[in-house]
Amino acid sequence: MQVKDSVIIITGGGQGLGRSMAEYLAGKGARLALVDLNQERLDEAVAACKSAGGDARSYICNVANEEQVESMVSQVAEDFGAINGLINNAGILRDGLLVKAKDGQIQKMSLAQWQSVIDVNLTGVFLGTREVAAKMIELGNKGLIINISSISRAGNIGQSNYSAAKAGVAAMTVVWGKELARHGIRVAGIAPGFIETEMTAGMKPEALEKMTSGIPLKRMGKPEEIAHSAAYLFENDYYTGRILELDGGIRL
């Protein structure tokens, strides 16, 4: 499919990887529906996308809330007249060990810590894909849904919740690739490794060096490299049901 004039929803589109993908796709002429919880960030992202050459609108939506997701998808379809793609990018971190014992004290990962990540990173992807796929079928639109997984899907210490969610996202990508192909909808995943973001920018130099030393390419990935890969997936009509690993060759 061509990116130009395609209507693409990006969750978590107001910042980080979501905004990078939005700006890159806008540069190729995409029409973007940016979804986030921060209106100020969304306004900045919309302006950046328009400057890059694309059309963009903003939508406030909690991806873990069924009613809000249903309403958002319906509104996007009404505003743009079509939906050709979705990038399930919204995600949160609530890292911590399952149990931590120190000085005779035992700390446990709380259920709230676990559930909040599952709600956004796994259930949010389910809700977004379900609603967008249903609306695309209803409208007779074909296209692509991209799910952002992670290298942590292999199991990363201190990330029981996040690893479980991202492994689930990868598994659902395979399932949906099989189920939705009959409707002309492809489903693909991207599993980024360690990427330069606002969060890593604030890390101490020694911590960054330790992180990058295990990466064969000896550097973190750049957001635009993830964005470039998202565009590739949209443009390659034979890619579905698989996860594209972008991690510089590192294995956890």
Image (tube, rainbow, N blue to C red):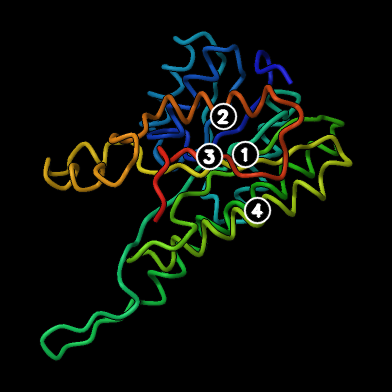
**2 or 4: tag closer to the N-terminus:** 4
Q: CA distance from mark 3 to mark 2?
A: 14 Å
| Residue 15, x across and y down, in percent | 39, 34
Judging from the image, what secondary structure is the residue with disc 4 in?
helix
Q: Residues within 10 Å of mark 4 (few under 14, many from 20)?
A: many
Q: Are marks 1 and 2 in contact (CB under 8 Å)?
A: yes
What kind of residue is marked 2? Answer: Ala
Task: From the viewer's perspective, tell me whether residue 157 is left or right of residue 75.
Answer: left
Q: Of label 1 and label 4, which has the lower sequence position? A: 4
Q: Label 1: which residue?
A: 146
Amino acid under disc 3: Thr
Q: Whole-Å distance between the Cαs marked 1 and 4?
A: 14 Å
Closer to the eye: label 1 or 3: 1
x, y (%) of residue 102? Answer: 15, 83
- The secondary element bearing badge 3 is classed as strand
Instruction: Please give the name of the residue rendered at 64% of the width and 36% of the height, measured from the top-left corner.
Output: 86
| Distance from Cα at disc 1 to Cα at disc 2 | 8 Å
Distance from Cα at disc 2 to Cα at disc 4: 21 Å
* Left or right of 44 in this view: 185: right
Circle 3 sits on which residue?
A: 11
For mark 1, give the secondary structure: strand
x, y percent for residue 150: 47, 49
Among the two numbered marks 1 and 3 on one chain, the one whose residue lies closer to the N terminus: 3
Q: Which quadrant of the figure has residue 87?
A: top right
Question: Around disc 1, counting alpha carbons within 10 Å, would you say few (fewer than 14), some (14 to 19), or many (20 or more)?
Answer: many
Disc sitting over residue 230 in the figure? 2
Marks 3 and 4, Cα distance to the nearest angstrom? Answer: 12 Å
Q: Is residue 8 above or below residue 91?
A: above
Which residue in the structure is indicated by mark 4?
127
Mark 4 or mark 3, which is nearer the start of the sequence?
3
Residue 12 coordinates in the image, percent (x, y): 47, 40
State yes or no: discs 3 and 4 in contact (Cβ < 8 Å).
no
